[in-house]
Image (cartoon, rainbow, N blue to C red):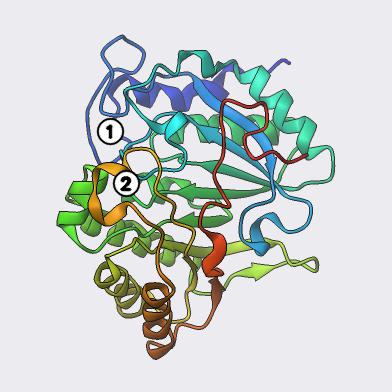
């Protein structure tokens, strides 16, 4: 595949990488890496059709998801820990740009026209390269930025016009929990600023096409953690007050104790119906009615295995 070499120019930002809130200033072209320990290449664990997202995202056909490795958070309960744990060696997941593009195009050619970048906050230059290269090849899918919410505002501003749908997590408004479980005491402040910028770009409406697929907008995810309903209530209150009660929210009950969750007493069991119901009631009190509520039986239903060719056992 022949591409203009200028398409690779965004990668130059990785020579002194400050693209995420960690601001490591690391040269990712060298052996001296920053917090995420990711290099300057295309470290992608999986490019696959995924049908486990919200109905407006994956629909009946599914979304083409790109799962980057490493992460700028280290959540002790991460369901994707096989690819996001920065202490693991992810060099086997390195792809060439051509290889990544061919896999993406193969899926888009099946009729899927929505492309998701999962955990992209520390790979934003690579996201730009892939989107621009696809455009140069005649592919213009709906672009979904599926983020942990720990995003740099200036980087988000530069994505305006390229991203069609923001799908961020809003994990914490409790700094102590953010530090204990994700190694990021500044998460509440950083995530709030990031969500405000996404909201500035998109507003509260989630525009869908005739088949019900999202075309433009913002959908915020929040995972309710067992024993921490006060944090969840603070998150939904912040969304309603700082953004709008008309923002679309996916309130998730799918928490399952995996990775290092067993080291923390509060995280060793699923969320109870009473805990989840308490957060749902507070959302309704706040006037938040747009979005998705999960069944309490969702715990354990969305666990991928990135050791498999298809981590979600779908075809």
Q: Residue at x 58, y 55 (%)?
A: 164
Between 10 and 88, the one nearer to me in the picture: 88
Q: Taking 139 as reference, is 82 left or right?
A: left
Q: Are marks 1 and 2 in contact (CB under 8 Å)?
A: yes
Between 259 and 142, the one nearer to me in the picture: 259
Query: Which quadrant of the figure contains the N terminus?
Result: top right
The kind of secondary structure element at disc 2 is loop
From where the camera sits, is residue 75 visible?
A: no
Please give the residue where the numbered disc 2 appears in the rendered image: 152
Q: Residue at x 26, y 45 (%)?
A: 182
CA neighbours of label 1 inside 10 A, class few (<14), some (14 to 19), many (20+): some
Give the quadrant of residue 136. Answer: top right
Q: Earlier in the sequence, mark 1 or mark 2?
A: 1
Q: Residue at x 64, y 24 (%)?
A: 100
- Mark pair 1, 2: CA separation: 9 Å
Please give the residue where the numbered disc 1 appears in the rendered image: 18
């Amino acid at each position: 595949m022949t591409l203009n070499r200028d398409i690779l120019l965004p990668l130059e930002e990785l020579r002194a990488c400050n693209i995420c809130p960690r601001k490591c200033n690391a040269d990712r072209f060298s052996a001296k890496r920053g917090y995420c320990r990711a290099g300057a290449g295309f470290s992608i664990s999986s490019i696959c059709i995924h049908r486990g997202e919200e109905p407006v995202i994956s629909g009946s056909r599914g979304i083409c998801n790109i799962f980057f490795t490493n992460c700028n958070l280290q959540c002790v309960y991460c369901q994707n820990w096989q690819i996001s744990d920065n202490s693991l060696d992810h060099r086997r997941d390195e792809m060439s740009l051509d290889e990544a593009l061919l896999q993406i195009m193969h899926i888009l050619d099946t009729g899927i026209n929505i492309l998701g970048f999962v955990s992209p906050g520390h790979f934003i230059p690579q996201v730009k390269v892939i989107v621009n290269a696809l455009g140069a090849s005649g592919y213009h899918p709906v672009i979904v930025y599926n983020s942990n919410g720990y995003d740099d505002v200036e980087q988000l501003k530069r994505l305006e016009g390229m991203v069609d749908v923001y799908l961020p997590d809003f994990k914490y408004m409790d700094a102590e929990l953010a530090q204990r479980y994700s190694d990021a005491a500044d998460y509440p402040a950083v995530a709030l600023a990031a969500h405000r910028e996404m909201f500035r770009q998109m507003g509260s409406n989630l525009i869908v096409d005739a088949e019900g697929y999202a075309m433009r907008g913002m959908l915020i995810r929040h995972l309710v953690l067992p024993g921490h309903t006060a944090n969840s209530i603070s998150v939904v209150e912040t969304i309603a007050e700082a953004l709008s009660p008309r923002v679309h929210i996916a309130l998730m009950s799918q928490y399952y104790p995996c990775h290092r969750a067993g080291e923390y007493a509060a995280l060793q069991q699923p969320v109870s119906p009473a805990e989840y119901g308490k957060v749902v009631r507070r959302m309704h009190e706040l006037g938040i009615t747009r979005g998705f509520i999960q069944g309490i039986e969702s715990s354990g239903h969305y666990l991928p295995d990135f050791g498999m060719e298809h981590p979600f056992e779908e075809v």
